[in-house]
Image (tube, helix red, strand yellow):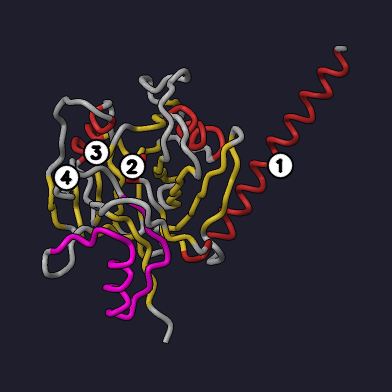
Amino acid sequence: MPDAKLKKRAISSFLRTLATAALALFSLSAIAGQNPCAEVQEGGVAYTVCDFDARKSDIRLFLRNETGETYGDFSRLASELASKSETLVFAMNAGMYAEDRTPVGLYVENGRLLNPANTHAGPGNFHLKPNGVFWIEGGRAGVTETTRFLKSRQRAQFATQSGPMLVIGGRVHPRIHEDGMSEKFRNGVCVQDGHIVRFAISNRPVTFHQFAGLFRDRLHCRDALFLDGGSASALYAPSLSRHDRFMPTMGPIVGVVEKAAR
């Protein structure tokens, strides 16, 4: 029996190593300019993960067009960019918003502060402290707890506040419990090495703990941020022929843009 147990553990360890190596290869291929998105499995659940290098990819946040109208959906944003000879190659909703589609918390676009940070107490996922900020500045990016971000006076070309943090310093948020029962579609983001931005969305409803486990155990992120969930969780990934349209009008959108081929 001891030999059988040791053999089982060895096989399990090998499979985990193989899965980690496969994900690393996927990440490298995405950074090299191949398909940035792939489906991965964790705990019996399928997720879509899209990797971009902030040093090479044009990652932006979008809320309103030049006339002040909220984009609201991926199609409208893609069309607007196409009119400027740009192509939307990836997009995802980028944090929580009010009924009028304005961001609930901090929102910076093209270096302009459009909405201040929200540090108030309150109900709902956003206020499950600590929450955090996903930010981009030049070729750098990060996910930082809100209080730390504000104290650091970090400059950001783009920034969006959401919550809760899923993973903090390699540990699951202390108020996200394994016995949580609420299952929803969920999407989030983490940043590795200061420039590798990893976006993830569940392909079926999952609990907060399951989603946090994806970032901690499979993607090996030390800090990860929940962006949104339920009907507000959506993905635009032409490389996977995916364009989620089942949700109502959304607020902030994070997108990756390329110059259109001529």
Tell me how far mark 2 sits from mark 3, CA to CA. 17 Å
The image shows residue 251 at horizontal and vertical percentages of 23, 52
Disc 3: which residue: 149
Tell me how far mark 4 sits from mark 3, CA to CA. 26 Å
Tell me how far mark 4 sits from mark 2, CA to CA. 16 Å
Task: Tell which circle, 1 or 2, labels the residue nearer the N-terminal end.
Answer: 1
Nearer to us of marks 1 and 2 is 2
Q: Nearer the viewer, residue 233 or 88?
A: 233
| Residue at (37% x, 57% y) in the render | 245
Disc 4: which residue: 99
Residue 92, quarter of the rendered image: bottom left
The answer to whether residue 132 is above or below residue 137 is: above
Residue 81 forms part of the magenta stretch: yes
Which mark is on residue 18?
A: 1
Q: Amino acid at mark 2?
A: Leu
Describe the element under mark 2 as helix, strand or loop.
Answer: strand
Q: Amino acid at mark 4?
A: Glu
Task: Tell which circle, 3 or 1, labels the residue nearer the N-terminal end.
Answer: 1
Nearer to us of marks 3 and 1 is 1
Which mark is on residue 136?
A: none
Q: Amino acid at mark 1?
A: Leu
